[in-house]
Amino acid sequence: MSRLTYDHRRVLNFTDAVFSIALTLLILEVNIPSAEAFHRTSFWDIIASIQLELIGFIVSFFVIALYWVAHLRIGKYVEEIDHPLLWRHILLLFFVVLLPFSTAFYVTGFATAGPFMLYCTNLAMIGLLHLLIVKKVTSQSAMEELTVKYEMTRAYVALAVFVFTGLLSMALPFWSRFGFGLVFILQPIFTKRLKRKKEKEKEKEKEKENERK
């Protein structure tokens, strides 16, 4: 019996659609004040009343966008999707769709640790499933070694940050809220290092070619 595979284009298109729906649902968790509220209070007081919801929306939006872009990159190397890879995508989408709920849950219980831990767990599971997808794809496709390191490094960094932030919340609840920013700091740092390494390897290859000539 031949190995069961699925049309990778349909799976990737469906994944893109779910990502876009999750991004859209996030804004629905931001409550719009009533018309009376605009007459009773100032504009900035109204913004202040929904600032936590806006922060939750912005953070979750860019985290989902970060993973969508990463999935676009790795999707270029997908040649076929077997049963294990399909279910990794399904579980990834489960936690992506769950994020609007965990975001609203975290914002509503902002002063307590439990909702934030749930939110961090949600992000960590997205990171873990993305890492498993990257591992599977890189093992099946003929990718350059540095490209594999690039994708794996970014996946590990994001997962580590979300796990670290969740653990930090148990000791430093307030400061842990800023932990997500490490993703946008550490990933570019590791990316630059890998790019420099790639440039050095290219220079070495050119030198070897010149020596042969």
Image: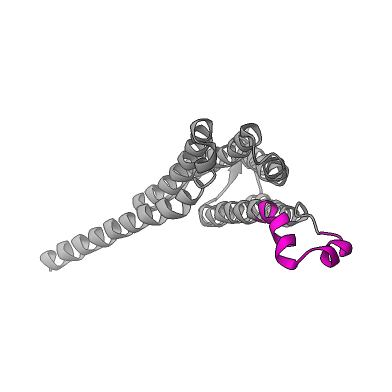
Q: Position of residue 40 (x, y in %)?
A: 84, 63
Dominant SS type (magenta): helix
Q: How many marks?
A: 0
Q: Position of residue 14 (x, y in %)?
A: 70, 52
Look at 72% across and 53% down and name the residue there. Answer: 26
Q: Quadrant of residue 20?
A: bottom right
* Highlighted range, magenta: 33-54
Residue found farthest to the front: 40
Look at 76% across and 66% down and name the residue there. Answer: 42
Q: Position of residue 204 (x, y in %)?
A: 19, 60
Along the viewing direction, whichever of 14 and 208 lies nearer the viewer: 14
Res 23 visible: no
Q: If the image is split into quadrants, where does the C terminus sit? A: bottom left
Q: If the image is split into quadrants, where does the N terminus sit? A: top right
Along the viewing direction, whichever of 203 and 143 lies nearer the viewer: 203
Residue 57 drawn in magenta: no
Along the viewing direction, whichever of 170 and 205 lies nearer the viewer: 170
Residue found farthest to the right: 36
Residue 43 drawn in magenta: yes
Q: Position of residue 33 (x, y in %)?
A: 82, 59
The colour scheme used here is: one colour
Look at 46% across and 39% down and name the residue there. Answer: 160
- Left or right of 25: which side holds 192? left
Res 29 visible: yes
